[in-house]
Image: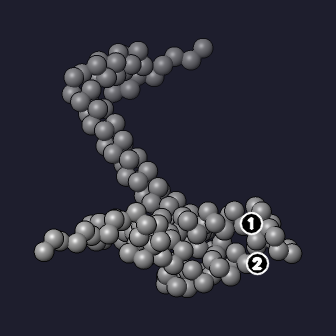
């Protein structure tokens, strides 16, 4: 059998006893809590960075579906969407329902992202007109607004 060699004049059992008393010291508990808090903070920062990177990757993927770069103008984006929609439409030869839906999702995602970016920079939410109608010339809006009443003389 082997016997424990004394270290610093103490046996293994004595060293373990001193280690147990160190772990129970109140200052050790505070140091442990600070290390845990610092670790949680680092993990939180990493999570935020990863979420931002994931959002960038997703948005670049949407641009890839349309075949444009993230720096494309609104007009280039709309033109690319229309071109791809004509090619991928399920009623056309070679078109597919799944591909067409993926194109629509990607386009909506880009518009939503750009709308959020605009509202953050201007402080007001952006309004995107539907199908070429501006809010002032929209037939629906014109029908809803009453005509101003004439003032009596």
Tell me the residue at 24%/21% (across/down).
25
Of 66 and 100, which appears nearest the observer? Answer: 100
Residue 71 at x, y = what percent?
49, 82
- The local secondary structure at tag 1 comes to helix
Rendered residue at 40%/63% (across/down): 144
* Residue 116 pos. (x, y %): 40, 65
Q: Which residue is mark 2?
A: 87
Callout 2 crowding tier (Cα within 10 Å): few <14, some 14–19, many ≥20: some
107 is higher (above) or lower (below) than 86? above
Q: Residue 80 at what x, y percent from top left?
A: 62, 81
Nearer the observer, 11 or 117: 117
Query: Is residue 152 found left or right of 78 in the rendered image?
Result: left
Q: Residue 54, image x and y in percent? A: 52, 59
Question: Where, by quadrant of the figure, is residue 124 drawn?
Answer: bottom left
Q: Quadrant of the C terminus?
A: bottom left
User: Residue farthest to the right?
Assistant: 93
Q: Nearer the viewer, residue 52 or 15?
A: 52
Question: Would you identify the image quadrant in which residue 31 lies?
Answer: top left
Is 29 on the left-hand or right-hand side of 103?
Answer: left
Which residue is at the front of the view, 114 or 89?
A: 89
Give the residue at x 37% y 68%: 126
First in residue order: circle 2 vs circle 1: 2
Please, is residue 43 above or below residue 124 in the view? above
Q: Is residue 82 visible?
A: yes
In the figure, residue 40 lies in which quadrant? top left
Instruction: Please name the residue that numbered disc 1 is placed on.
Output: 99
Q: Is residue 129 visible?
A: no
């Amino acid at each position: 059998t082997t016997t424990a060699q004394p270290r610093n004049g103490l046996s293994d059992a004595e060293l373990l006893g001193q280690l147990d008393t160190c772990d129970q010291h109140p200052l050790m508990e505070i140091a442990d809590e600070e290390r845990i808090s610092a670790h949680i903070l680092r993990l939180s920062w990493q999570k935020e960075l990863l979420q931002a990177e994931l959002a960038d990757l997703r948005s670049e993927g949407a641009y890839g579906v349309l075949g444009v770069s993230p720096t494309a103008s609104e007009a280039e984006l709309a033109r690319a969407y229309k071109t791809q929609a004509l090619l991928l439409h399920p009623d056309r030869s070679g078109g597919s329902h799944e591909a067409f839906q993926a194109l629509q999702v990607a386009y909506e995602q880009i518009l939503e992202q750009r709308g959020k970016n605009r509202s953050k920079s201007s402080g007001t939410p952006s309004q995107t007109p539907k199908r070429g109608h501006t809010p002032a010339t929209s037939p629906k809006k014109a029908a809803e607004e009453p005509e101003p009443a004439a003032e009596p003389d």
